[in-house]
Amino acid sequence: MALYSFIGVAVTSATSIIYGQKIWDPVDVLAMFNNPLVLVIALIGLCIATLATNIAANVVSPANDFAHLAPRFISFRMGGLITGLVGVLMMPWKLVSDPNGYIFTWLIAYSALLGPIGGILIADYFVWRHCHLNLTALYDAKGEYRFTNGFSIVALIALIAGALPSLPGFLVQVKVIDATKVASSLVGLYSYAWFIGFAIAFGTYLAGRKITALTRPSVGIDQPQTLPISK
């Protein structure tokens, strides 16, 4: 990922020197080439990257998510079709048409959710469970990962707590509320949404786990169990 980011920065910087303007879109960069052979090779590489990496990486996860919502009615293939339809309805070409909106509105707002989710996952697996996972219980409707009626209340609270600090800045960014009506310190938190959300969710989740372990010791409740676990 570091190399991928470096290539993006290096190529964009090079276009500023060569063409007099910063071009960040690979398709627009290719349009500046005049050599037919270079164009053919570059377009083949772009097609392969799109089909083998971009589409596959971005379809597999949501396709599984849709399939898990109703396994009896939605297969993985149907989940992929639903993902494609939702992707078209989101009109992604509008997102990338404006770099400012794409980076500061879409990506940062997206990170405000991904940060807390990452904090919860790392806190649970690496800290609370000490890298142990009960594989059998993952597929047991009444196992230790069932939590409270299928939902981890502690994780949901941690997610909300991690995302809330970035909400004022997001509302200002999308012009739902005026920036003068919100403290500048709260608006500034939005630029660090991933890091702030990660830290808050991480701490909130661990605190919630300790509280539930002390107050709700019954098996099947949203708290860690003492069932046999394996690596």
Image (cartoon, helix red, strand yellow):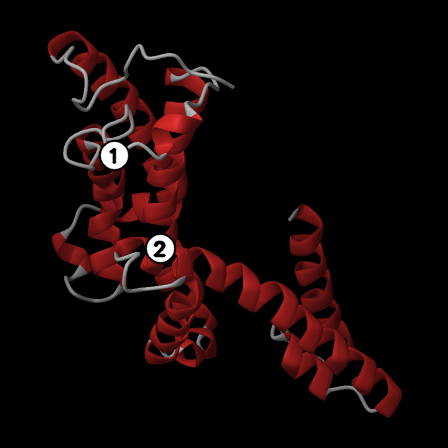
Give me the residue at 38% from left, 12% from top. Answer: 228
User: How many residues crowd around disc 1 within 10 Å: few (fewer than 14), some, or many (20 or more)?
Assistant: few
User: How many residues crowd around disc 2 within 10 Å: few (fewer than 14), some, or many (20 or more)?
Assistant: some
Give how far apart the Cα atoms at labels 2 and 1 are. 18 Å
- Amino acid on which the number 1 mark rests in the picture: Ala
Give me the residue at 30% from left, 56% from top. Answer: 71
Q: Nearer the viewer, residue 64 or 208?
A: 64
Residue 215 is situated, as x and y percent measured from the top left of the image, at 11, 10
* Callout in the foreground (2, 1): 1
- Amino acid on which the number 2 mark rests in the picture: Asp
Q: Is residue 129 left or right of residue 22?
A: left
Q: Quadrant of residue 171?
A: bottom left
Sooner in the amino-acid sequence: mark 2 or mark 1? 2
Q: Secondary structure at mark 1?
A: loop
Q: Nearer the viewer, residue 26 or 68?
A: 68
Q: Nearer the viewer, residue 166 or 37?
A: 37
Q: Which residue is mark 1?
A: 141
In the rendering, which numbered label is found on residue 65?
A: 2
Give me the residue at 22% from left, 50% from top. Answer: 167
Give me the residue at 54% from left, 59% from top. Answer: 57
Q: In the rendered view, tell whether residue 121 sits above or below residue 27.
A: above
